[in-house]
Amino acid sequence: MSDIQITLPDGSTKSVPAGSTPIDVAKSISPRLADDALVARVNGDLYDLGRPIEADAKLEILTPRSNDPDALFVYRHSTAHLLAAAVMELYPETKLGVGPPIDNGFYYDFQRATPFTPEDLEKIEKRMWELQAKALPYARIMTEKNDGLSKYKEDWMKCELIQEKADATFSEYTLGPHFIDFCRGPHLPSTGKIKAFKLLSVAGAHWKGNEKNPALQRIYGTAWFNKKDLDAYLAKLEEAKKRDHRKLGQELDLFSIQELAGPGLIFFHPKGGRVRKILEDWMRDQYLARGYALVYTPHVMRRDLWKTSGHANFYSENMFTPMELDDAEYQLKPMNCPGHILIYRDKLRSYRDLPVRLGELGTVYRYERSGTMHGLLRVRGFTQDDAHIFCTPEQIESEVVNCLEFAIDVLKTYGFDSYEAEVSTWDGGASGKYDGSADQWQLAENALKRAVESLNIVAKVMPDEAAFYGPKIDMKLVDAIGRKWQLSTVQFDFTLPRRFGLEYIAEDGKAHQPLMVHRALYGSVERFFGILVEHYAGAFPVWLAPVQAVVMPITDRQLEYAQTVAKKLDDAGVRVHLDDRKEKVNLKIREAQLQKVPYMLVVGDREAAEGTVAVRNRKHGDQGAKPVAQFIADLQALVESKAVTE
RNA sequence: GCUGGUGUAGCUCAGCAGGUAGAGCAUCUGACUUGUAAUCAGAAGGUCGUCGGUUCGAUUCCGACCGCCAGCUCCA
């Protein structure tokens, strides 16, 4: 048998007989490596440790310490198989769907007449650990397609997959005596390598994600290389639960959703309203400072308008149904763009007028399917910080740059340090599903890419992810606990200017069609508000806090002094509340802490005599006494700098 | 919309193998004048999501609907 050359990651080579497996090589390097090995990467492809290598190759042995996302994926995929094997032992009549790894874990889809209960999950998890302890091998078997189909005749979903995806010969993996799965692999050598996992939930799903297909039961789980990582992840889930804006929204009395009014419709309470005003004022001021004009457009408009814009056609399932009025049909607006377009079109525009930037905090109504609403994040009525820019081809690059700078400013202002950008482009026109000319797409996509470059933004290009009416760039922020949220979007639109026949008179004296850019930076004010609540866990920075300070007299002897303190703060523009109840300070402090008020100002006889307040900060506790004027000045400095620490 | 779960006082929750409900907090009243995370006592508060069915009798069992939750699908 001839030898082959194996090149290792450090550049060294090893000569081994052809047909050697990665685990053979690992053993020859060190027993410990062989022991830790999970999976191999051979010339960039993932291989089972026991799969022979036939020719010269680059080899990398992946272990938990490799910190390699592919290794974790294989690990989670194998855990999904472990789940399925346990289910098949306990409930042999179950039909198997698919079981892929996902971010943080895995799932497996099953079809079974009776639903899995939480108790079933416990039973399954217990069985999984039993199979884990047996260190069962994941064995790879090669099968002829025809044999495979008859082997899986009991499992219609697997047959469908084999029909669609399998080559003439395909791989399968067994795990124990009761489980075999059509699967590309690779997998861990044995269940003994799986050290930390937990089943999390069972939820409905449809075969191939199509709701016309049969409903399946999906069991979700999470899996990690070790218990510490698992515990850290579970702690993160707990933390996310604590930050849930729906829970905090109620506890902090920020907003509510009323059953009598309908789902997906938000009521901002006084405290939430106070914060929202700050967000809105900031945004409107920025619009004016950055050369946008503020406009207001109606909430209902004739259906004819929505026919012209095309929304009555391609967007109708997202619109509230029309209402009859004076023999005409009217419809609530799902978008602000047609309104802004009507303002643009209301007079003849010269190239000298461009760019025209029309901005509005426009409340739109969209029909969302009943099961899809989620707190403030997914609603039926929401307010976009929406602007439309009409410009010449020469202007688009600088307009895009301005939008992106603005978007980054939003992130910085609200305390988000990290973000990601995605440029979504078309397919080059191959499918015909995109509107607009190749010239337009090229112009716009180049402008987006150049803008991103000039600002040193790292952006992923997403081919064939554009809207049908134009390319776009989306910004995603990363919050305090590492979650990503889609926020700002800047989108070109080649369709609406044509549909509405928009024009400007250029230097050549002829009418040209302007380019149009949609852009929303908060996205939706409601949604952004929700993201802020979760990011700050309800403890808004001082400049955003609905109540910035609570004055707490210790006894009613200091009531009068407390009132003068509160008045001074109020006069200085501080959002202050006077807690003049006949209650103990301990209680007042506790409640203010729970309400996450940044400053508690205790006033007793000493403070009254000295003209001071005893400052307690929600995070740092007792800060000692300060003259009232000093406290005001300090707080104003925090507000002025929009500080996120206090 | 689909699958599964769920819905008891303002909030968090207990209870009921079918005999019209209970706690803590909040609210109200009274007492306590209190120094950095809950003072004490009393009172009041619910057509047990809605409608219908079974039953002598339903908050409890059954059905439909509505809302909420976890997902699917979709998306700002």
Image (tube, coloured by chain):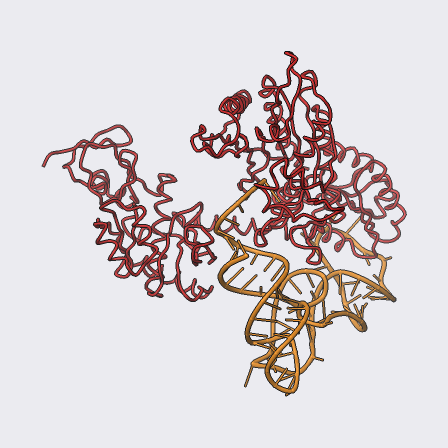
Chain colours: A red, B orange
Total label count?
0
Quarter placement of the C terminus of chain A: top right
Q: Position of residue A340 (x, y in %)?
A: 69, 31
Q: Which is nearer the eye, A343 or A168?
A: A343
Q: Quadrant of residue A66?
A: top left
Figure quadrant of the N terminus of chain A: top left
Specify whether residue A629 is in view.
yes
Out of A300 and A461, give the one closest to the viewer.
Answer: A300
x 55%, y 38%: residue? A478
> On the picture, is B26 further left or further right than A462?
right
Residue A76, image x and y in percent? 37, 48
Residue positioned most to the left: A1
Note whether A505 is above or below A584 in the view shown. above
- Toward the viewer: B35 or A176? A176
Nearer to the camera, A640 or B30: A640
List x then y, in percent, for residue A295. Answer: 74, 32
Residue extending farthest to the front is A327
Residue A456 appearing in the image: no
x and y, in percent, of residue A92 in the image? 33, 65
- The residue drawn where x is 21% and y is 54% is A147
Residue shown at 45% from the left, 64% from the top: A115
